[in-house]
Structures are given as C-alpha cells and as structure tokens.
Amino acid sequence: WRVPEEFKPDNLTYVQLQPGAEHPWGEGVEGILVATSGAPCHSVVVFSAGGEVLCVGDSESFGKRIASPARVASDGRFLIFVDEGTFAPRAHVTCLSLDLQPLGQWELQPNEDLRTQPGFNRNYTTRGPVALELSTHGGGTLWACYRSAHRIAAFDAAEMCARGGRTGVSAAGKPRVGTAPARFSFGGNDEEGTIPPFPADEWHSRVMASRRKRGALSSPCAFTVSEGRVYVCDRENHRISVFSADDGAYRHCFSTFGDAPGCVRGPAGVAFAAGHVLVTEGVYGRRIQAFTPEGESRAILCPPGGKQPMLRGLCVGPRGRIYAADRCNDLIHLIQLRR
C-alpha cells in the first residue's frame, strides 16, 4: 500500500499487541505496523495490519528533533526507538506508548568505549545505534547495532526498566533517564582509522583484509534475532554474518557481492520467517532473497514499483506475511511467504 505523502519508509516493525495493552484503537486491532523514516522526514507512522494510518509522530509532536528514527523495538505493550542521543556514543533511547506518547528514556552504555575500538569511523553522522530489536532471549534483551563502531551490543531489558522506569519523570518534568550497561558486544574490525597512514592501494588492501576476517563487521546496518542466532547485515562486506545470541560468538557467514543467486549487494534489511533468512539490498538492488539459515539461496522476489525500488527494512507479520519498505516508490509491499 502507498504511505502518506512525503513519508519515505526506511524501517518496519510489526508489533503483536499484548492482551490488555493500552491503546485507543479498539479490540479489533491485534497488531500494528510501525514504520520509521530518517532524513528528511524524521517521523514515525503507525499502521493497522491492513494499511490504515492510526497515528503519526514527528519532530514537532515529540517536542525535540528526531535525529534518525531507526527500527522500533517492542514487546507488544510499548515502543522503543533511538532518540536525539543518536549523535552521542552513549545514546538515549526513548520509550513511547503504542500511540506514540513519550514515557521515558534510557542511556545505553556499551561495555567498552566504542570510540576507542579499532576501525571506529568518525565520519559517520550517526555514532549511536542505528537499529534496535527486543527479544525474549536471555530473559529479555534489547539489541543495538552501532554502525560507526561496527558492533552489536546486547542490553538487559529488565534491568533497563528497573534503572530507568518506563514512566519516570524528573523534578523538572522531563522523562527520567536511567542507565543500562551492556551484557556484551561483538563484531568490530581492525581498520586503522579513516585517513590512510600509508599509500592508498596498500591501505585499501589492509582494510579489505581486516573486514573479511571471520566475525569482523563493516558498517552493519540491520539485524534480526531468531532461534538463538543473530543475523547481521554486514553491509560493506556484502554478506550476512551469523553470531550466537548467548554470548556473541561467531558462527558463520554467507553471500558475497554480485547479482547471481546467493549473492547480495550491500544488504540493508533482514528478517527470519518460515525457516528462512530474508534479505533486501537497499540502494544496490530491487530484490528480496530467501536463504536457508546455513546460507543456501532458495528464492528471489522482485516486487513491482513505478521507479527502481529501493527496498530497505523488512519485518514479519502474522500468518506468514512479510512487510517490505520501498523508500523510492513510497510503498510498503505485503508479501505472502509459503514454505
């Protein structure tokens, strides 16, 4: 379906509402689709599962500039997304009600200073998380993707609530900010800064060699957690890297740069459904490719669109439905996945 005028969908999250969850849309709404858009919109739109616009939030309604809203995380009762603290290494994430009313904030504290990690790219505008996901793994985990530091960090969701308080308000009337230290993080690479200290050809060779190491990441931009594994869009390596959700241990990776089945160009979105890993290619391609968890290509789909599609975020809905964001055509594609 077509999205509201001037809204460019980047990321999608389907939220299965919890029984008793507070929302203004009546008992007939069992799930919602939350779409976010970065520049120039900086906004969030909540749809019904059938495409009806339920509510819209933007910079004005949130009372502060939204730097670049990333994929929303949710447990079916409230929403979490990256706030203006995106520009800081210790980023704030904001908790919202299902109808986009602010409830509280947390400050994510990685278990190391990401600015000191090898390969930290200071040229990225966004130095905090660019993607979030909330999973039940380990008793409740909020996962955050740090593109500039090439790492994924895991935070204890229950501890976040205990420290920050979803509805906490300071004496000044502002949402209380709690802190949340990470359980662990993984990924990274061995790049030596952003300015070549030696001839460009040699620098490029060293950088590419470090990026391709087992378990190294380069500009990860999206991920999904399923069946004890974390599947990461390793964008500049043109592959999907797989890690353990228990401790971040590297498992394997699959795909390489190209157009043939089994290859991807700059993966931009990933989801897990019906036993398959689904991957979009962002600005590089117009297709969605389905892989087995081990990396075997099983199917390729090219959704229709007026212009060259720019497929970004993916998410899984009920009954085998897949939602895909098409930023270039202002569309959200609904795909029925069958085994």
Image: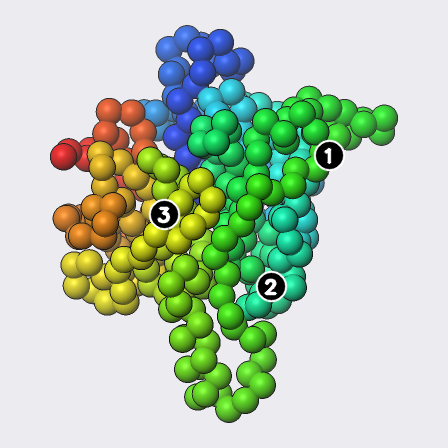
Q: Kindly indicate whether the residue at mark 2 contacts the one at mark 1 (C-beta within 8 angstroms).
A: no
Res. 20 mark: none
Q: Horizontal and vertical percent for residue 173?
A: 81, 26
Q: Is residue 185 visible?
A: yes
Q: Horizontal and vertical percent for residue 67?
A: 61, 48
Q: Mark 1: few, some, or many residues within 10 Å (few <14, many ≥20)?
A: many
Q: Kindly indicate whether the residue at mark 3 contacts the one at mark 2 (C-beta within 8 angstroms).
A: no
Q: Quadrant of the C terminus?
A: top left
Q: Horizontal and vertical percent for residue 132?
A: 50, 41
Figure quadrant of residue 258: bottom left
Q: Mark 2: few, some, or many residues within 10 Å (few <14, many ≥20)?
A: some
Circle 2 sits in a helix, a strand or a loop, which is it? loop
Query: Residue at (58%, 74%) from the top-left corner?
Result: 193
| Kind of residue at badge 2 | Gln
First in sequence: mark 1 or mark 3? 1
- The residue tagged 3 is 231
- The residue tagged 2 is 117
| Kind of residue at badge 1 | Val
- The residue tagged 1 is 177
Which of pointers 1 and 2 indicates the residue nearer the eye?
2
Q: Nearer the viewer, residue 270 or 141?
A: 141
Query: Residue at (26%, 60%) from the top-left corner?
Result: 255
Circle 3 sits in a helix, a strand or a loop, which is it? strand
First in sequence: mark 1 or mark 2? 2
Relative placement, left or right, of 240 versus 112 is left
| Kind of residue at badge 3 | Tyr
Q: Mark 3: few, some, or many residues within 10 Å (few <14, many ≥20)?
A: many
